[in-house]
Image: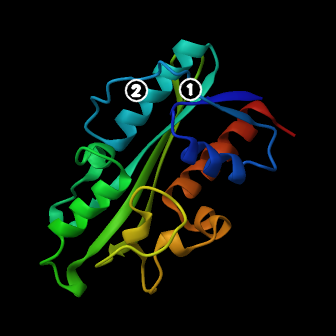
Amino acid sequence: MKIVLATKNPGKLKELVEIASSSNIDLVLAPADFDPEETGSTFTENAIIKASTAAKMTGLLAVADDSGIVVDALDGRPGIHSARYCPGDDRDRRLKLLDEMKVVPEGRRQAAFVCAMAVCEPDGAVIFTSECTWRGRIAFDERGENGFGFDPIFYMEDADITSAQLSPERKNQLSHRGQAWRQVLAFLEKKFMPR
């Protein structure tokens, strides 16, 4: 079953393909000109915008995620603006967050990764949504080489390890995106591949 993943991010594609390896799903990236304006006020609204756009562009079933990091001490920022938190790349965004958090003490650095996913029919109609959270806290510096985005500064809850220090398999078991994607896979299998 061919499904378009409404992103041009190969890191996201790699993560989701690994989790779906035992399913009969052929996940492909969105076309090069895929660039919808994310005008939603929530992760779920933005996931729907992306999935609907990719579905209409390709004529395929589409899955999109919108994810980011929500930091308690920053009143939920960067939130839905995580990917556009500042100009530059992932490291620039991590350094900006660390700079904003430098005066926040150890006990007040709680945060969560949030991932919303939406599935849309080829005509753009929404048929499923899911939103999952992975709680943790913000580190004082970067640690780890795996993952992408804010992974090197996101400590797991009650552990002295960042998500960038986890193996890809372990991260996929725990992460916000892994949780949401498994819910999507269960929906797809029930609806389109009944036993």
Whole-number angstrom distance, CA of label 2 to CA of label 1:
13 Å
Residue 144 in the image, given as x and y percentages of width and height: 49, 73
Front-most of residues 145 and 3: 145
Q: How is the image coloured?
A: rainbow
Residue 103 in the image, given as x and y percentages of width and height: 12, 78
Front-most of residues 21 and 188: 21
Side (left or right) of 17 relative to 66 = right
Front-most of residues 86 and 136: 86
Residue drawn at x 59%, y 21% as measured from the top left:
121
Front-most of residues 120 and 144: 144
Residue drawn at x 36%, y 34% as measured from the top left:
46
Q: Nearer the viewer, mark 2 or mark 1?
A: 1
Q: Residue furthest right?
A: 195
Side (left or right) of 115 relative to 186 = left
Q: Is residue 120 visible?
A: yes
Q: Is residue 73 above or below residue 34?
A: below
Q: Which residue matches tag 2?
A: 49
Q: Which residue matches tag 1?
A: 30
Q: How many numbered marks does the figure carry?
A: 2
Image-quadrant location for residue 94: bottom left
As shown in the figure, which amino acid type bears the numbered disc 2?
A: Ile
Residue 27 in the image, given as x and y percentages of width and height: 69, 35
Quarter of the image containing the N terminus? top right
